[in-house]
Image: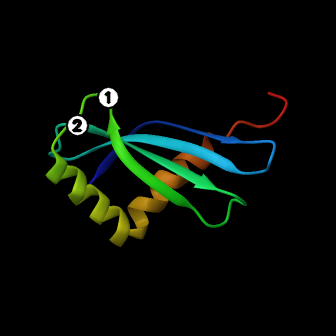
Amino acid sequence: MTIKILGSEMRRHEDRSFVGKTIFSMDNHKANYEITFFSTRGTEWDYSLSFAGEPGSEEEMLQTDALLETNDDIYNELLDAALDAQEVEGE
């Protein structure tokens, strides 16, 4: 299964926590997805998956979530996209 990254962002808050997201599409899925990342220190990450824009098939979303749980390469690609888009203080 391949993904296409459509956009990403990451922000670091004053309390030093990170919040970011990556919007992506999956082959043969009608809806786009948004994965939101959160970390208090930037080492261990929590995430939530939702539809980006219009809702799609719940079954396809469950398949995507299962893929993220089992495929570290895809998960890391989405997280890295958000980290690469991180805003630097002073910009």
- In the displayed structure, 56 sits above or below 64; it is above
Q: Residues within 10 Å of mark 2 (few under 14, many from 20)?
A: some
Q: Is any part of residue 21 visible from this angle?
A: yes
Give how far across and how far down residue 30 sits, in percent. Answer: 17, 37
Give how far across and how far down residue 27 sits, in percent. Answer: 20, 47
Q: Quadrant of residue 13?
A: top right
Q: Mark 1 vs mark 2: which is more N-terminal?
A: 2
Q: Residue at x 42, y 69 (%)?
A: 72
Label 2's element?
loop
Q: Nearer the viewer, residue 79 or 12?
A: 12
Direction from residue 68 to residue 83 in the image, left or right: right
Q: Nearer the viewer, residue 89 or 65?
A: 65
Q: Residues within 10 Å of mark 1 (few under 14, many from 20)?
A: few
Give how far across and how far down residue 21 sits, in percent. Answer: 51, 42
Q: Is any part of residue 1 visible from this angle?
A: no
Q: Residue at x 59, y 53 (%)?
A: 38
Q: Are marks 1 and 2 in contact (CB under 8 Å)?
A: yes
> Residue at label 2?
31
Q: Residue at x 69, y 59 (%)?
A: 42
Give how far across and how far down residue 90 sits, in percent. Answer: 85, 30
Q: Nearer the viewer, residue 87 or 57?
A: 57
> Residue at label 1?
53
Q: Residue at x 78, y 50 (%)?
A: 16
Q: Which quarter of the figure is the C terminus placed in?
A: top right
Amino acid type at circle 1 is Gly
Q: Which quarter of the figure is the N terminus placed in?
A: bottom left
